[in-house]
Image: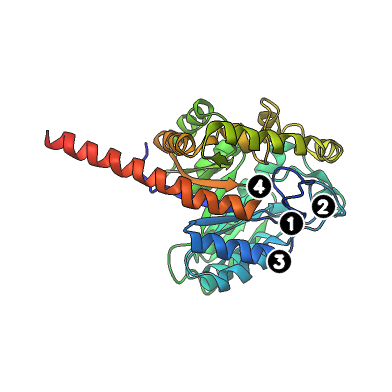
Amino acid sequence: MATAPLRFGIWALVHGPRAAHQDPEEPYDASWERNRDLILAAEELGYDSTLIAQHTINPHQEDLDQLEAWSAAAAIAALTKRIEIIAAIKPYLYHPVVLAKLALGIENISGGRFAINLVNAWNRPELEKAGIGFPDHDARYAYGREWISVVSRLMEGERLNYAGEHFNVTDYALRPTSLYRKRPAIYVGGESEPARGLVAGHGDVWFINGQPLEDVAGLIADVAVRPRDAAPPLRFGLSAFVVARETRELAQAAYERLLSLAAKDAPMKAIQKQNTDPEVVMMQTMQKTPRVGSNGGTAAGLVGSYDEVAERIEAFHAAGIELFMLQFQPFEAEMRRFALEVIPRVRARRSAKAADGWARSLG
């Protein structure tokens, strides 16, 4: 299935460290300044994409800082030149007309490098404390399906008349539309049956949470064959936390260090679990194996020597993963290590395999 280009991205640090909050090597910092510098450094290092998660309240602990995703995405769009900028969005927080207008604005500021990541919410206090309410799992996805159908058509420039269960839009058109393509890209997260149907019907890329290769391959196989109407084939991304070192032993030691630090966050994780809808498949998946990092983290198996991690990335790509959205800790140093040590190995392996295939074809 690996026909799409292989891309690497980073999670922005909008709510601090991704693995452990009591790490002396990475003090808590979710500031605009740090995220700006992080994404600029990632672009310089050759990373292709960044994902800016959206929360109004820090999902780990309410008194910790939380960067606002969409204002940050607009600012990053103006400062960068090449990297894709993906901003997550929870439909209940924005009317689709307003969100579509924001998305088109950032699309044009960035020169056609913007995307939205539709997330149908799991953190109960964000919605309940705002008086919005927190419907059950499938109802949130039904709302999200209607919401994205309005957003996508408005982003494409359609003069829209829409009457649905949740929205009534009359003779509405947004200008300017994208100056660079049909519309911003749409990423979709979630692995439940409603999520799979939503991404097949409305998404461009499905974000899969970090988990073993065979599980990821099964998810891809299930969704790839679903009807897409006239849309292009669905593409696939994977979230993963990376611990790569010169040897497997050094990587394992670094992983164990993070695992022990993460254990100190048990009270914080208990609060997060209490605030999370138990029907969210991501949370169910994350309980299956020990791990560090969010959204599956090290469950994807990208822990090992540089060569081992490169080999596992190639295997995921062969299964259909196009974009690897990566986490590290301490983030800046490990992001640089990965760019200098692992990415060249992945490129070399792919070049060697392509040359071998070409030689065999001449045969």
SS for dot 4: loop
* Mark 4 neighbour class, 10 Å CA radius: few under 14, some 14 to 19, many 20 or more: many
The residue that mark 1 highlights is 93
Marks 4,1: beta carbons within 8 A: no
Q: What residue type is labelled 1?
A: Leu
Residue 135's x, y, as percent?
78, 42
* Mark 3 neighbour class, 10 Å CA radius: few under 14, some 14 to 19, many 20 or more: some
Residue drawn at x 47%, y 58% as measured from the top left: 46
Q: What residue type is labelled 2?
A: Ile
* Mark 1 neighbour class, 10 Å CA radius: few under 14, some 14 to 19, many 20 or more: some
- Asked if residue 138 lies left or right of residue 113, the reply is right
Q: What residue type is labelled 4?
A: Gln
What is the quadrant of residue 275 in the picture?
top right
Residue drawn at x 12%, y 37% as measured from the top left: 362
**Marked residue nearer the N-terminal end (4 or 1):** 1
Q: In this view, does 206 lie above or below 73?
A: above
Marks 1,2: beta carbons within 8 A: yes
* Residue 43 in sight from this viewpoint: yes
- Front label number (1 vs 3): 3
**Marked residue nearer the N-terminal end (1 or 3):** 3
